[in-house]
Image: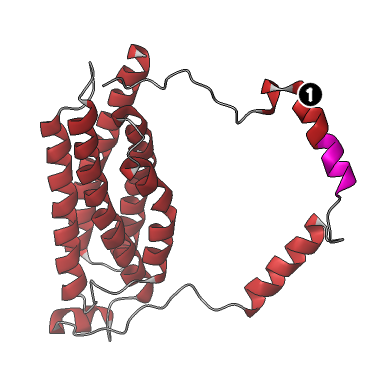
Amino acid sequence: MNQSAPLGDNVTGIGRSSTRAEEMQRGMENFPPTSVGTREGAGKVRVQYAKEGHPVGSIPKPVEVKEKLKSALGAGAPPTLMDKLGQRLAFERTGTRLYEALISKHEAYGGFDGGPTREALLEILNEEHRHFAELEQHMISLGGDPTAVTPSANLAAVATEGVLKIVTDPRTSLLQSLEGILIAELVDNDGWQLLCDAARNDGIDDLVDLCEHAGATEQRHLDHVRAWLAAGCAAE
């Protein structure tokens, strides 16, 4: 199937009809806004809501912490570390789902010169799933609950919602879906670095090792996606 966006009867732009544009402008003059609010007023309302609002979420208390970690970290792992660990868990879980959907796009549209093979996409999917499983074990060993949604995990879920919609939309091609994947891979790389920094600051060496290895793998994913997109755009 064709990966290129087709020319069609797109009527979303105002430039299609200058007459209708003028009519729309006159309509705006005839029916002005029903409120007297301003942008500054809207900003004040947001500030008020923010001051009165509750946090996005909370970090669960430790379930069980090994004696070795109790002596090194005190009562449990630092809350910031657990928050970022929860975020990585959520993101890698989503990454697995994204590549599952991308494989479906490959099966529906087929590949293109210089683009990903099904085998290459499956390899990345398995690596994303492996990262999730390893993070899950680290969360448990630190006394955390891998099923809990931490504040940063909540933010990650909201932030990736748009990418999921792109990749799972039946109308988007494989090439268009790769543009969504690029967004996820860029965020993923920086997310691993943030967790690595937090683990290093707290002296959790085995988690640092995982982050460094996973970060190198994710950089390779990003390089692949960039190359596939470049090839697809050149082919168009």
Q: In this view of the protein, can residue 187 be seen by the observer?
A: no
Image quarter of residue 220: top left
Q: Which residues are magenta?
A: 25-31
Q: Quadrant of the N terminus?
A: top left
The answer to whether 117 is drawn above or below residue 42 in the figure is: above
Q: Quadrant of the C terminus?
A: top left
- Camera-side residue: 165 or 170? 170
Image quarter of residue 209: bottom left
Where's residue 7, x and y in %?
A: 47, 17
The residue sitting at 24% across, 27% down in the picture is 109
The answer to whether 144 is drawn above or below residue 120 in the figure is: below
The answer to whether 118 is drawn above or below residue 230 in the figure is: below
Where's residue 53, x and y in %?
A: 59, 77
- Which amino acid type is shown beneath numbered disc 1? Thr
The residue sitting at 54% across, 79% down in the picture is 54
| Magenta stretch, overall SS | helix
Q: Secondary structure at mark 1?
A: helix
Position of 217 with respect to 39 (left or right) is left
- Binning the other alpha carbons within 10 Å of mark 1 as few (below 14), some (14 to 19) or many (20 upward) gives few
The residue sitting at 33% across, 48% down in the picture is 188
> Circle 1 sits on which residue?
19
Q: Residue furthest top?
A: 235
